[in-house]
Amino acid sequence: MTRTATATSAEGSHRRRTASAPGESRTRLTVTLFVLTALLGVSAIAGLAIGSVQVPPGQVWGIVTHALGADRQPPDWSRARETIVLDVRAPRVLLGAVTGAGLAVVGTALQALVRNPLAEPYLLGVSSGASLGAVSVIVFGVTLFGPVSLSVAAFVGALGALLLVYATARTGGRITSSRLVLSGVAIAAMLTAVLDLMLLTTDRGNETRAVLAWTLGGVDWGTLWLPSTALMLGVGVLLTQARNLNLLLTGEEAATTMGLDVARFRARLFVLLSLVTGVLVAAAGPIGFVGLMTPHIVRLFVGGDHRRVLPTAALGGAVFLVWADIAARTVAAPMEIPVGVLTALCGGPFFLWLMRRDARRGTDRGVA
Amino acid sequence: MTATELSVDGVTLTAGARHLVRDVSLTARPGETIGIVGPNGSGKSSLLRAVYRVLRPERGEVRVDGADAWSLPVRQLARTVAAVVQESAADFDLAVREVVAMGRTPHKRLLAGDTPEDAELIDAALLAVDAVHLADRGFDRLSGGERQRVLIARALAQQPTLLVLDEPTNHLDIRHQLSVLGALRRLPATVLLALHDLNLAACYCDRLYVLYEGEVTASGPPAEILTPGLLAEVYGVATEVAVHPRTGAPQVTFLPQEPRA
């Protein structure tokens, strides 16, 4: 008797819950995506307005809508301002947004693939591998693949570094946090050392300077298509794999029993993530911690389901990097700080906090 | 089809040069509940891992409804065979409902969303393990026993016709041990499970396989194989076995070990 009673009451209460729970989280996601999109728009306008020449936001709006053909009013701004907004700042803001979005989704996917919350392309040495690849092309003057040589080499470097870190960190089918981060740091240090050696010994003075001037500022409309395409490809493919990324959260064996061929899945995604990271690093240079911070912050708002985390992280990463770039060119104006310095300033403390939180939760499987 | 026939033929599993399981054969007819018992390190988990396709046999075959489990695509096998594994899951910010929903993955096409039928299956699975009230809680905030029940619900949501469970009663309090095993027993599916508790195994399994040092020492209905002689040989403990008057199942009483002189 009591048994039936509990069963029916439980059934009643869960019926209410099914009516609300999925709808609730969908609303939450819609609101979050909407807010972030609006925020990205505002950030982009700020990015176009702020700089050595301040352009009022209203004028930025006018210039942009005019350029898009939506505004037929005769322009009331100088040609120079139009050039600054459209040809100097716009590509830079776009590259910032694309790079931020790309690094954030790469970080999200990496954290699931290696099942570790501290994973991130920069910390794992993937960005260093990409830099080394790209710099080799410049220093040795290899142009086997024409204009995309830099990106191809960066991709190869990224993939090599990722495989190396993964192979050294994995023992007996497990990756512990400490081992992963240590191999990442060691391999990044080695690759950076090789990079420094190459830069010091090369007799190609101009090319070296080209490498060192590697900031978001070096971009123009003609080179923007490659990182944008890589981002679209990366986000597109990852969204189709969101369920499978979720499966990996429960462990490799469990994921296998739910129909995921883990080894093949990981190999394919490693290639994809290296490709995206490589192209982004070739365009914008190595930028750390965006891929680490964004997914964690985003999960606080939309939960851990990758179908929600991926699009949210893309927008969040874009907003973050647009602002980081604004800061990079204003805090020490007229000097420009590499944007990676600023992201590391925010990201370093975040990393430490994350590490301590995980230690408290007892999830550092290096100890377990 | 609601239940699968499982046959394990002469399976040998190795880790490096070490034998985990040697020449083990086992069958489960459709709808049977088969228990695997044996001391720690006897190869129970390894044998299960070969069935749910994580540990490839060195020799021998695992056949699911006659088809070699290791030549089926992983995804296709996952529509038939679900498992609750012992591997400790990482911490992740997923709600219980989302964890259970993962069980639907092998039945889903690329990008397909959750349908009302999925929602019903998820609800039913949660109900079966008495976890309806946990649905909106974060999985990482649950106790060990609650997590275990949620993982069983996830396997149920997969609608398997063969369910493989490695120590499903781990971390569960006695009420939930009984209710979970009862729910598994009522499933139309074939169930293969490793259990530590011999009395629970005797109550809930149609047949038992006793593994000892990677080999099957005995198999058959619990009443036939749970004898003081066998238990002394396999576990090295002294026992008395009596048929319980109400359940009709053999009941093992463990006798305290004599202090060594």
Image: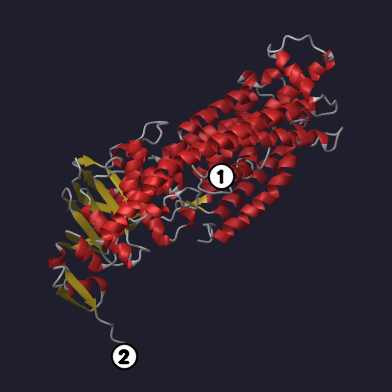
**B183, above or below A260, in the image:** below
Q: Which quarter of the picture shows residue A3?
A: bottom left
Q: Which residue is mark 2?
A: B261
Residue in front for this viewpoint, B45 or B14: B45
Q: Amino acid at mark 1?
A: Arg
Instruction: Give the residue displayed 48% in from the left and 47% down from the top.
Output: B94
Q: Chain of mark 1?
A: A
Instruction: Give the residue displayed 58% in from the left and 40% down from the top.
Output: A107
Q: Chain of mark 2?
A: B
Residue in front for this viewpoint, B146 or A211: B146
* Residue A272 place in picture, x, y as percent: 52, 32
Name the side, left or right, on which A217 lies relative to A99.
right
* Residue B5 place in picture, x, y as percent: 18, 46
* Residue A108 place in picture, x, y as percent: 55, 40
**A2, above or below B245, in the image:** above
Q: Using a 10 Å C-alpha cutoff, classify the residue at mark 1 as few (fewer than 14 neighbours), some (14 to 19) or many (20 or more).
A: many
Name the side, left or right, on which B214 lies relative to A298.
left
Name the quadrant of the N terminus of chain B. Answer: top left
Name the side, left or right, on which A66 lies relative to B152.
right
Q: Amino acid at mark 2?
A: Ala
Which element is circle 2 on?
A: loop
Q: Return the mark for residue B244.
A: none
Name the side, left or right, on which B171 lies relative to A85.
left
Answer whether labels 2 and 1 touch (C-beta < 8 Å).
no
Q: Using a 10 Å C-alpha cutoff, classify the residue at mark 2 as few (fewer than 14 neighbours), some (14 to 19) or many (20 or more).
A: few
* Residue A166 place in picture, x, y as percent: 53, 45
Q: Are marks 2 and 1 on the same chain?
A: no
